[in-house]
Image (spheres, helix red, strand yellow):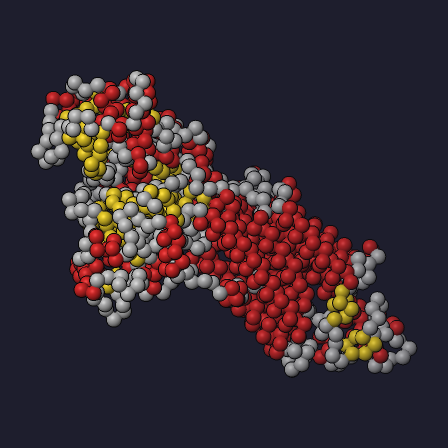
Amino acid sequence: FKRHILFTHFKFNTQPIAKQNKMAETQIIIPQASFGENAFPDNNKKNNENGSIDKDDFEKLSIEDAIRQLETTSEGLTKEEAQFRLGKYGPNKLVEKKKNKLLTFLSFMWNPLSWCMEVAAIIAIALVDYVDFILIILLLLLNAAVGYYEESSADNAIEALMASLAPKAKVLRNGKYETIDAGDLVPGDVILVRLGDVLPADIKLLGTESDEPMQIDQAALTGESLPAKKFGGQCAFSGSSVKQGEMNGLVYATGTNTFFGKAASLIDGTESSGHLQQVLTAVGSVCVITILLWVAIELIIQFGVRGHGCSGGEGNCPTLSNILVIIVGGIPIAMPTVLSVTLALGAYKLASKGAIVSRLTAIEELAGMDMLCSDKTGTLTLNKLSVDEENIVSSGSFTQNDVLKYGALGAKIENNEPIDVCIDKSYKEQQKETGDSSDIWSKFECTRYVPFNPTAKRTIAYCTDLKTDEKFMATKGAPQVILSMAHNFPDIKEEMEAKILEYASRGYRAIGIGMARSQDQENCDWEFVGLIPIFDPPRHDTKETIEKCQELGIGVKMITGDQLPIGIETAKLLGMGTNMHTTEVFKTDHTGMVENSIHIDDLVEEADGFAEVFPEHKYDIVHRLQKRGHMTGMTGDGVNDAPALKKADIGIAVADATDAARAAADIVLTEEGLSVIVDAVLESRKIFQRMKNYAKYTIAMTFRICFTFGLLTVLYDFNFPTILIVLFAVFNDGAMISLSKDIVKPSSNPDAWFLKKIFANGLVYGLYLTLSTWTLYYVASHTNFFDRFGLESLQYQEASAICYNKYAANLTNDIAQCITNITWERQSMLRALIYVQVSVSGQALIFVTRSKGLSYFNRPGVMLLLAFVLAQIASSVIAGFGFGGYPFPSDSTNCVDCQHFSGNAPVTGTTSVETPSVIGCGTWVIVAWVWSLIWYVPLDFIKFIMAFLFNDDAPSLPRWLSCFINPFRLRKDTVNPNFAGSLHRSNISTHTGHARPSQ
């Protein structure tokens, strides 16, 4: 899927950190935006050979000069001027490499499996077999066309949904802030940037040197390990992340003219082959090895033992024609298309459920996830905060009204921060109750605001009372931080900390409020005003969702920045385990032991959650879980969550996440809550199940085709026409596209490919179906079993007896031709019979591989059932009526001895007698269907035995059979066999919060 370029970080500097920092200070080059000849003063214009402007020279421009040269104002552009510049300079996007539709289409024919088919086409044309050559090419084109159409349709739908998540920018237009798509920014715009934003363009910060500096993370651009401090007048670059602060910025470069764009243009895009490609390679390798094995056997037997010749011309080399059958029938040509289409359609289905996938392989990993580290706020809880006004605590001479007032003054609702909005709303409601409906800012003025940051954990508002002209500061933040700032901290410490713990035990979040009666932050006496209790209730469906996760073999850990008592109280409300810890446990000695009792890795794995967590702890938690073999998912929404999201196997950006979090995530949620994650897990397991069902089927068919036709050729010198096997591939493999929409049940445990098991099942199914075809061939052609049903005899070995009886009185050459005629006719009908039996029994196997129970009672999808019916009707018609003796013998004569066919037969003594012609087998088609049905019934029981042998979920076997098989049972395949949560169990431990293995 197409990622928005602003979400992508390019790391292009591989120099050591010290050298990178030096380069960042002295050698950063900013591409020049083309604003006209007078874009910059001549005395500051220092063009390099590439037409760029040195960063240091540009930063020397005063803010006033920069605004003047960009022909804008500090209030931004008008909408009309912005629209004009958008047309002139283009959108704020990097040049996207448009996919060449023809090359995309041809890419579906450029993979190892398609190469084998292309080799088959070359052999066909070398044999002057134009019909088979055309059919093979058409099969390749049809396969590519279906894959291209389905994937393009899904891509277009996903692009439309991703467009709704395109990064936004808060821009000044006509003197007012409005939110627009970042792609519509133009040089001269003034934008607001704040904590969590990914800068959408190169900007010059509009602030004074006395303003609080911003912390800008430029690691993706310069390799700097720490955020850089940026003061007013300095430059910040597109793709950087805001770690702290808030300021207006003047856009001076957009799109490919940005520093980010310049860097990106120097980098060749690379794409990982991905896990799916590795699976395809493994499957393809097994198929190719099997094919090569049988090709070698046939060449040795046919040329070396039987002495068959091979000359140019159509029909003059039957051995190579048989090899074509092995290649075309054994290659799962539709596999790349079926799996790609299944993933693409599945990703679109996930998007419709509120989970947009940024990379397809994340679907596989989500299906195998066995551990989920979830944020508490907004994911486990509603993130709709409210103040419990009755339990507000004031300190000293301050009143409850003062607590709310100073809290509202320390808030900035323009940023839509939930806590700020909550406190402001509560203060307004209280004022309305007293009859005062005026806005707080009609009485006070905020001259400077220091926003919240993860380090200081507080905000500070520099305020002036408009009535008394008194200047003061109001602050709010973490209660311990605000409390420790108070001048009388020792006197009130015990009382207030007890109240904070009481809040925590009740699931409240405490917000500390303070004020100082001056604006000299260094030399003022802070006063502790009081505590505001804020409550974020759990979502109504979270408890049920967590239980569902545990039933699905997924351990859920709560990761929260709140205090430990709040985390434990929330865990109790949600029915989670309360084995939670603070991040103090990460302060271990060099042995990794916590309090000399448990290793930190064991503690992380067994814990139900962690409180008072900082971003670096999230990263460490994910890392330690991965070390223990867990497929780990991590949710997050803030810029500080980005490292952990990137580290996790499945990074999940929750609804309303920052651009930085979305950039690092594999999956972006568009709906709130944990339930959407469970829905996504279930859907991903369904998608994965469809892919595994097809893989089992197609591998079994490779073994079946190679062994069936290889054995018939080696044992009976039986030739088979390539045209029938090509039609088999068209009807059967083509119909498998419908599997991408099949009805399936998701796995009850985390899932993975477990290819050895798939290959083992495929081999057993393939050999069993081979036995069914060989048995039918032998009974029909070597016994008189079917004579009792009044069917035309297919015993071609009776030809000699029939002809000697017919020409007993006149022993001439007519006897030899008679034997040739009857043998050719019956073998031609036998080919039609074998074709329809292979087709019906082969495609019916999908109903077995797609179900875990009895396939007769497991309804498939309508599309799959319809595809099966139509494909087998077509196969039955072809087998019943045949091709009128096609492929026609090159040397032929009128078949006067044929019993049911009127046409030409090969001339005896010529190579034409080996021509694999096809004559309709008539009512033998019914025999093929009945035979396939009879042999189909035991397949489910073979499946059960294999599942029992591999320790998979399967119906219980009879005691006598279980006793026989038990010694051969293998260890159960799980994503993480050492983790209890990866095994399904009905009893859930309340201590650890995830499933334990049954005893």
* Quadrant of the frame with the C terminus: top left
Q: Say how many tags the image has.
A: 0
Above-or-below relation of 46 to 676: below
In the displayed orientation, state which residue is furthest to the left: 523
Viewer-nearest residue: 917 or 113: 113
Q: Is residue 628 left or right of residue 928?
A: left
Above-or-below relation of 71 to 673: below
Q: Position of residue 988 (x, y in %)?
A: 41, 31
Q: Is residue 203 left or right of residue 669?
A: left
Q: Is residue 349 left or right of residue 809?
A: left
Q: Residue at x 38, y 63 (%)?
A: 269
Q: Position of residue 755 (x, y in %)?
A: 48, 54
Q: Quadrant of residue 977?
A: top left
The reply to whether residue 461 is in sight is no
Q: Residue at x 76, y 54 (%)?
A: 926
Q: Residue at x 42, y 37 (%)?
A: 672
Above-or-below relation of 710 to 485: below
The reply to whether residue 728 is in sight is yes
In the displayed orientation, state which residue is furthest to the right: 809
Viewer-nearest residue: 702 or 401: 401
Above-or-below relation of 186 to 50: above
Q: Position of residue 400 (x, y in %)?
A: 24, 19
Viewer-nearest residue: 479 or 458: 458
* Quadrant of the frame with the N terminus: bottom left
Q: Position of residue 532 (x, y in %)?
A: 26, 24
Q: Residue at x 65, y 48 (%)?
A: 865
Q: Is residue 173 left or right of residue 164?
A: left
